[in-house]
Amino acid sequence: MKRSRIWTIATIIALIVVAILAYNLFNQKKVYATTKENDYNMAFYEVVEYVQNVKTYLAKSMVSKSAEHGAEMLTHVWREANLAQAYLGMLPIESQELENTEKFLNQVSEYSYTLSRKNIEGNSLTDEDIDKIKELYNYSNDLANTLNEMADELNNGILTWQDLMRNTEGSDIAEISTFNVVEENFHEFTGLIYDGAFSEHIISSEKKGLIGDDIDEETAKIKAEEFIGKDKIKETKNNGFVENGDIPVYRFEMITHDDKTIGISISKKGGHVVFLNYNRDVLEQKISEQDAIQKGKDYLTSKGFENMQETYYLKQDGFITINYAYKQNDVIIYSDLIKVKIALDDGEIIGLESTGYLNCHYERQVPKPKISIEEARNNLNSKAQITSERLAIIPTEWMTEKFCYEFKGKLEDVDFIAYINAETGAEEDILIVTNTPDGTLTE
């Protein structure tokens, strides 16, 4: 009896151990599966990003006539296509299913490298070269669109990488995904014998617009309350001094009489408003984008920001964020940038960011162009349809500025903005424009 009881206890213990081991093994497999899923997602989204970059740089190459700028763009195409290929190889899909896509990316890479060498040697691209770039652009655009559809399927759970791995056992990929469209897009391809523009280039060490003496926290608080309107404020809280940002600021939180909470930052040097924001719900859009743009411009004028011209905007969740650039003598100066956020139900200003303006603003000695606008226009692809042209000053990534002719136009189905140096005729930059119902984006 005693021996039987011992065996029973031993059996129970053994079963418990087996159950624990099985549970741990199950958890390990689950963790492994999750890790692999995350790895595949990471690789796939890298492919999406690099293919989008290939498309953008090809579009810029279509517009450009400058050998130097063309070489730079085509070198970017070569690099991004190579990276897209590398990450594509990490996905759990059999090679025959990706054969055409891999072949296409390889040809994009090799051909763009060949053309970049041609540019580097000082030779301009021929009409035949541009036509082939256009063909590559069209296919890369199709590929980018299809990959975005697949991204939606992954995000919405319609498709998983487990589905694709099971698919390698023989089922048709068309049954479970739009991924087959990626391949179909290239069946006829026989091979070969692109927050507003410039916003990332407006950080300066000199802070030309940050004028005035240093102030203390109490003075900054008074300036913040005056900016909002002291009669509107029920309480002001000091949220400390931030010294390690681009512009050292005093931060405050204000509670209004109607219980809004407004965050505002005031610069230590000069007492300028650097940032203002508060959030609220917008249930219905009642004013147009043009009305909002005018309200933003009037607001800036009332706060002492004169001669501001709207450039780009983006709508989101009932709000519109508009970039305004300073205009001097009919020359738009993209360095001196202020962003204004406006509610589209009643036009209330609920956000402002003046970092670009405070970094860069001063009254410039705007030079006279040394080349005519006709000469500058001749540096663009002759097939481009120009819709507007004007003078502009643009910032560069080296914290300098260039005096340019700005040409907005269209080539085939590509909207672009090109900047030709008004003094030398050099091609300084080309932006690819995406017009959406929510605003205008540039790459």
Image: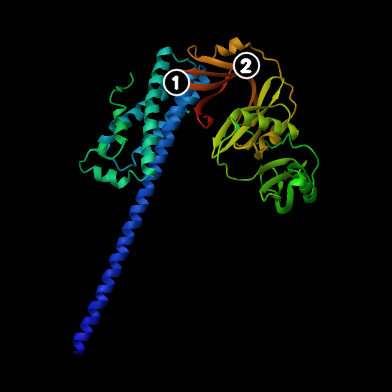
Which residue is more in the foreground, 187 or 178? 178
Marked residue nearer the N-terminal end (2 or 1): 1
Q: Which residue was labeled with disc 1?
A: 413
Which residue is more in the foreground, 268 or 309? 309
Q: Which mark is residue 424?
A: 2
- Disc 1 is placed on an element classified as loop
Q: Position of residue 139 (x, y in %)?
A: 37, 25
Judge the density around disc 2: few (<14), some (14-19), many (≥20) Cα neighbours within 10 Å: few
Q: Which mark is residue 155?
A: none
What scheme was used to colour the molecule? rainbow
Q: Amino acid at mark 2?
A: Thr
Q: Nearer the viewer, mark 2 or mark 1?
A: 1
Look at the picture and state if 406 lies above or below 317.
above
Q: Quadrant of residue 301?
A: top right
Q: Quadrant of residue 355?
A: top right
Q: Position of residue 19 (x, y in %)?
A: 27, 69
Look at the picture and state if 300 lies above or below 133.
below
Look at the picture and state if 418 lies above or below 313.
above
The quadrant the N terminus occupies is bottom left
Drawn side of residue 63 relative to residue 23, left or right: right
Please say whether residue 354 is visible from this viewpoint. Answer: yes
Q: Position of residue 128 (x, y in %)?
A: 40, 13
Please say whether residue 109 is visible from this viewpoint. Answer: no
- Disc 2 is placed on an element classified as loop
Which residue is more in the foreground, 108 or 48? 48
Drawn side of residue 44 relative to residue 333, left or right: left
Q: Amino acid at mark 1?
A: Asp
